[in-house]
Image (tube, rainbow, N blue to C red):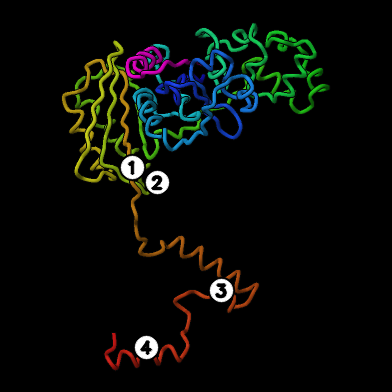
Amino acid sequence: MHYYVWVGLSHFYTSELTQPTVITSNGLVVESTPCLTRKGIIAGLSVKIARALTECREFIELETRLYQLQADEWMNYLTSYSDEIEIDGQSAAWINLSKHPDPESTLKLLLMTLGANLSSSFKFGVGCSKWLAKASANYAYDARSVQSPAQYLSDKSIKCLSVLPDDVLDKLQLLGYHTCGLLQTLPYKVLVNQFGTLAQLIQQSSHGLHIDVIEPIFPRSAISVSHEFELPLDGLDSIQELLTELALALAVKLSEQAMYGNQIVIHLQSESQKRLTIQRVFNRTLFSTQGILWAIRMLIDGQMFQETKSIQILMPNLSHRFELQQSFNSARRMDIDNALHQIHATYGASSVVLAKELQPEWRRIFLKKWVHTLGIS
């Protein structure tokens, strides 16, 4: 079962503006200052309609690059609780807490962290899928959005079914199905007759069974691994093998992406929900198992809780590593020879020629030897 959290900041772009202002993008309202929001100038509204509803003259086209550092700053608070984060614009994100043994307690810690560090207000929602987590942010917190999605949706407006096209929602309302509970009672055959191939999506979403999963894309240029302990730790010596496995997993990820780093961030969580973050920037590059393991041991020595429940190791701010391949491996060489043989058999021996087999023109050979003889560089 997935445990997804959606967090969205209010007035991310306008929190520091003193004059009534509307932020726009592609002809639609993105955000407005609180005084205009109360008058109905909300996200998604057409700019033409917004201009007709208010006397405000400050309509500013959004430039996302100006807010990227600010966006990364608040999202970095999320990385202490999950290594699977998908951004939803610059002011919102989905967080996967499914790997935590007690996601509800972790959610409380996450909300406390955001409340203590963010100047702007925010709202959140939870669900067993991305769309349901975002939709539940418009209602009071209810654990049923994860545990019993059909029951949770039964009294909600079908407008919360964001996975359905607008014309489908309009047609359902015209037919008298205004809530998800009513829609759940509609026979599947009727849905097929009315909506064709969309029938299955309508039925699944009304029961909360349509699942769209988080695709982690934050933090950028970063990798991480985590582990949940089944039994209390008995000192650092008891987890040496585990630390080696985690270091190897990080090294493999770095190798696959041809990257390296010089920073390690370790998050520890105890049974009593106590959290500890240890981090350091090293002067040496880290890309091998031995190097990463050395860095982890240096940071973690003497820091582990006796009742440590989970550990997460993050390597942020990675850089690309450029490597030169000296030769083909034997298997690859054989594949190339077989491919060339088939091409030559079909199109002739001169159709494809290896670079080392190319014979330069006699004129070029003569000039090269002449220059060498004269000693001209």
Q: x%, y% of residue 189?
A: 81, 19
* Amino acid type of the residue that numbered disc 1 sits on in the rendered structure: Leu
Whether label 1 touches label 2, CB < 8 Å: yes
Which of the two labelled residues, at mark 4 and mark 3, occupies the earlier sequence position?
3
Mark 4 to mark 3 CA distance (whole Å):
26 Å
Marks 2, 4: nearer the viewer: 4
Whether label 3 touches label 2, CB < 8 Å: no
Q: Note whether residue 47 is visible.
A: yes
Q: Which residue is mark 1?
A: 318
Neighbor class of circle 4 (other Cα within 10 Å; few <14, some 14-19, many 20+) is few
* Amino acid type of the residue that numbered disc 2 sits on in the rendered structure: Gln
| Residue range of the region highlighted in magenta in the rendering | 107-126
Mark 3 to mark 2 CA distance (whole Å):
32 Å
Whether 154 is drawn above or below 250: the answer is above
* Secondary structure under the numbered disc 4 in the rendered image: helix
Marks 4, 3: nearer the viewer: 4
Q: Which residue is mark 4?
A: 368
Which of the two labelled residues, at mark 1 and mark 4, occupies the earlier sequence position?
1
Q: x%, y% of residue 276?
A: 25, 21
Which of the two labelled residues, at mark 3 and mark 2, occupies the earlier sequence position?
2
Q: Which residue is mark 2?
A: 257
Which of the two labelled residues, at mark 2 and mark 4, occupies the earlier sequence position?
2
* Amino acid type of the residue that numbered disc 4 sits on in the rendered structure: Lys
Mark 2 to mark 4 CA distance (whole Å):
42 Å
Neighbor class of circle 1 (other Cα within 10 Å; few <14, some 14-19, many 20+) is some
Which quarter of the image is occupied by the C terminus? bottom left
Mark 3 to mark 1 CA distance (whole Å):
40 Å
Q: Look at 29% across and 42% down and name the residue there.
A: 261
Q: Which residue is mark 3?
A: 352
